[in-house]
């Protein structure tokens, strides 16, 4: 699942936990950390900043309100924003967090556990140059 869905799902999960009164201090702190990270990204974008003051409980509404800003400001590629979103989602809605895991069909020789985005260079590799005659 792409990063924007993780961010908007986390925002909605944090708001839902707060509205329902089930939010722990860790969830509240994590929610505020994610919003603070996004506020830094949204500097100069008054409409997006205003939207962050709401506690919307639907990911689709968050997507509609700030989705374009998340892309335009690079928030979807910001490791700090993504880490805060994943942490909040794990704390506030573990079942939803589990659904956002990615299944990989082709590993391209990679072995191990990856907990962050991984990029593989699939370009054709040139063979080494032959040794110089000498």
Image: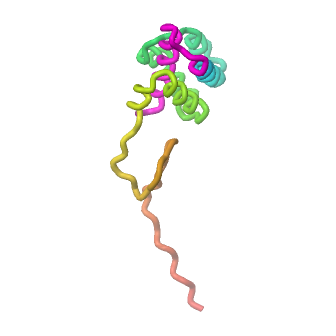
Instruction: State the predominant SS element of the stretch in magenta.
Output: helix
The picture quadrant where one finds residue 122 is: bottom left
Looking at the image, residue 118 lies above or below residue 23: below
Look at the image and tell me in which quarter the C terminus lies: bottom right
Looking at the image, residue 116 lies above or below residue 89: below
Residue 9 lies within the magenta run: yes
Q: Between 127 and 53, which is closer to the camera in this rendering?
A: 53
* Stretch in magenta: 1-28
Query: At which x and y percent is residue 32?
Result: 62, 18
Query: At which x and y percent is residue 31?
Result: 58, 19
Looking at the image, residue 116 lies above or below residue 95: below
User: Which residue appears at 46% of the width and 65% of the height?
Assistant: 125
Looking at the image, residue 79 lies above or below residue 8: below
Instruction: Please say whether residue 85 is visible from this viewpoint.
Output: yes
Query: At which x and y percent is residue 82?
Result: 55, 32
Instruction: Please say whether residue 42 is visible from this viewpoint.
Output: no
The picture quadrant where one finds residue 27 is: top right
Left or right side of 83 for 56: left
User: Which residue appears at 51% of the width and 42% of the height?
Assistant: 115
Residue 48 lies within the magenta run: no
Q: Between 3 and 46, which is closer to the camera in this rendering?
A: 3
Query: At which x and y percent is residue 87?
Result: 54, 29
């Amino acid at each position: 699942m792409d990063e924007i869905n993780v961010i908007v799902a986390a925002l909605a999960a944090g708001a839902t936990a707060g509205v329902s009164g089930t939010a722990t201090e860790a969830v509240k702190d994590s929610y505020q950390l994610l919003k603070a990270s996004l506020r830094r990204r949204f500097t100069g974008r008054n409409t997006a900043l205003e939207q962050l003051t709401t506690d919307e409980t639907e990911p689709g509404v968050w997507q509609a309100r700030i989705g374009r800003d998340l892309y335009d400001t690079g928030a979807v590629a910001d490791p700090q924003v993504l880490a805060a979103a994943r942490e909040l989602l794990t704390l506030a809605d573990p079942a939803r967090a589990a659904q956002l895991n990615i299944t990989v069909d082709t590993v391209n020789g990679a072995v191990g556990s990856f907990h962050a985005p991984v990029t593989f260079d699939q370009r054709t590799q040139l063979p080494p140059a032959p040794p110089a005659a000498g």
